[in-house]
Image: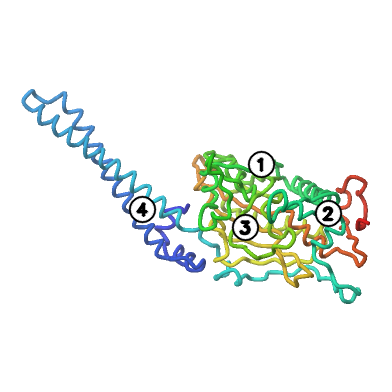
């Protein structure tokens, strides 16, 4: 949802954002027209209602001779007010639809273009030279199966393709990673939340996930509810219709939940292993903050992600995602992508988005400043997710099939694994 005052004052900036996203700038003109119609119709309704009240008050003062004409006029006005009320409601719906059709205006510095037009901001770490070490690396599925960490076949038997079981050391590694992420978040002032994974339509729509990618979301038709693809959704809805007292600083939450994605449109892509799956777990950061601090908070979330990837000792790069590849709510997004040695490419492991006031306006989340209320900014960022295991297995595999455990992760491993530098393959 856009701030109409900003749209009226600088419509060309919104048109340019639409162009950079690859969208039709004419949607801005449609919004301006809908806004004019809404305001005009509302003014007509309010003027007619004021006249109706004035005429109604005059009925008692009218003489017996005048009263029939006054009553007839009052009846006409009542019908007119009723019609104008309906017209105003219709104009409001048209305006809201036109507003929601426009994605969040991108921030300065976001590259124009689509998926392949990202900007590489930094490359951190050097990929291992497996050839110099004397062996060809195995992909994450082979390594995981050798460790007894993953069972894809039984996942498919029980739930279908792109489902899996993490077991033994696989499950312990995932939980260790999440515990490490949660501790780090707590150190930075985040409140831990375990969140609902089923939400109502107004929450899913309010976060901007029911746009062109709604086919990726699991819909529960019998209940008219949705399974979430990220705890960003319930965390964004947590303060719906509330006024927050931020006192000039961000309010931070750390959500842990299962996540569900249909992966529509990804047929044939990354079907081996657990890169693209229908269910996974994730630790997600979410922040409500004053809009003036949103870009600073965005950098803080990115620094949190960098800290975690550093603890996992993974080579990675940071990209500034192009406008056409942003979700509808994001004004800017940075991805951290870990190196995959068997595919000779980088794979996204974290994303952090600055959604400015876009989600908050749709969900009516405000803060009180100097006795007045205004929309807050919302931001989100991945701190750890199941997919990280792919990068862990591939980058830290050893020639004998064992797995190196990053130093920071070792204290979090349980069941006799804590402190181990290497995990041996099963016999």
Of badges 3 and 1, the one in the foreground is 3
Q: x, y (%) of residue 353? A: 62, 57
Mark 3 / mark 2, whichever is N-terminal: 2
Identify the residue at image location x=78%, y=62%: 391
Q: x, y (%) of residue 403? A: 88, 60
Q: Residues within 10 Å of mark 1 (few under 14, many from 20)?
A: some
**Quarter assignment of residue 10:** bottom left
Identify the residue under disc 4: 35
Q: Which of 335 and 152 is in front in this view?
A: 152
Which mark is drawn over residue 263? 3
Identify the residue under disc 1: 195
Which mark is drawn over residue 149? 2
Counting every numbered tag in the picture gives 4
Identify the residue at image location x=69%, y=64%: 270
- Disc 3 from disc 1: Cα separation: 22 Å
Which mark is drawn over residue 242? none
Of badges 2 and 1, the one in the foreground is 2
- Disc 2 from disc 1: Cα separation: 27 Å
Left or right of 213 on screen, residue 411: right
Mark 3 / mark 1, whichever is N-terminal: 1
- Disc 4 from disc 3: Cα separation: 36 Å
Position above or below: 391 against 81: below
Q: x, y (%) of residue 185? A: 74, 48
Q: How crowded is mark 3: few (under 14 residues within 10 Å), some or many (20 or more)?
A: some
Q: Is mark 3 on a helix, strand or loop?
A: loop
């Amino acid at each position: 949802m856009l701030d109409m005052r900003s749209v009226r004052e600088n419509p060309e900036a919104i048109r340019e954002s639409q162009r950079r996203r690859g969208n039709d700038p004419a949607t801005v003109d449609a919004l301006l027209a809908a806004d004019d119609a809404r305001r005009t119709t509302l003014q007509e309704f309010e003027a007619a209602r004021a006249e109706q009240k004035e005429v109604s008050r005059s009925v008692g003062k009218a003489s017996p001779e005048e009263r029939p004409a006054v009553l007839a006029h009052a009846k006409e006005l009542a019908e007119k007010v009723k019609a104008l009320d309906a017209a105003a409601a219709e104009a409001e719906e048209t305006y809201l639809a036109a507003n929601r059709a426009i994605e969040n205006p991108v921030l300065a510095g976001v590259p124009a273009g689509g998926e392949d037009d990202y900007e590489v901001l930094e490359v951190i770490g050097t990929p291992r030279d497996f050839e110099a070490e004397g062996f060809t690396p195995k992909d994450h599925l082979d390594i995981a199966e050798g460790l007894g960490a993953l069972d894809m076949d039984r996942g498919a038997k029980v739930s279908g393709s792109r489902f899996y079981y993490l077991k033994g050391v696989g499950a312990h590694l995932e939980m260790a990673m999440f515990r490490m992420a949660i501790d780090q978040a707590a150190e930075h002032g985040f409140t831990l939340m375990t969140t609902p994974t089923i939400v109502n339509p107004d929450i899913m729509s309010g976060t901007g996930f029911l746009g062109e990618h709604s086919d990726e979301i699991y819909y529960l038709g019998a209940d008219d509810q949705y399974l979430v693809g990220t705890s960003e959704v319930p965390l964004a809805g947590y303060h719906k219709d509330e006024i927050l007292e931020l006192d000039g600083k961000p309010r931070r939450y750390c959500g842990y939940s299962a996540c569900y994605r249909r992966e529509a449109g990804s047929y044939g892509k990354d079907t081996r292993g657990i890169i693209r799956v229908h269910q996974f777990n994730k630790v997600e950061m979410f922040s409500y903050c004053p809009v003036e601090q949103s870009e600073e908070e965005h950098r803080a979330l990115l620094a949190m992600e960098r800290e975690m990837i550093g603890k996992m000792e993974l080579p990675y790069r940071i990209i500034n995602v192009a406008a056409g590849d942003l979700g509808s709510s994001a004004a800017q997004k940075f991805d951290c992508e870990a190196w995959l040695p068997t595919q000779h490419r980088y794979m996204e492991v974290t994303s952090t988005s600055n959604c400015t006031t876009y989600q908050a306006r749709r969900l009516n989340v405000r803060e009180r400043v100097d006795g007045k209320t205004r929309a807050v900014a919302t931001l989100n960022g991945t701190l750890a997710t199941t997919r990280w295991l792919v990068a862990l297995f591939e980058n830290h595999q050893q020639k004998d099939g064992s797995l190196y455990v990053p130093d920071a992760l070792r204290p979090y491993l349980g069941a006799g694994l804590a402190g181990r530098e290497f995990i041996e393959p099963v016999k």
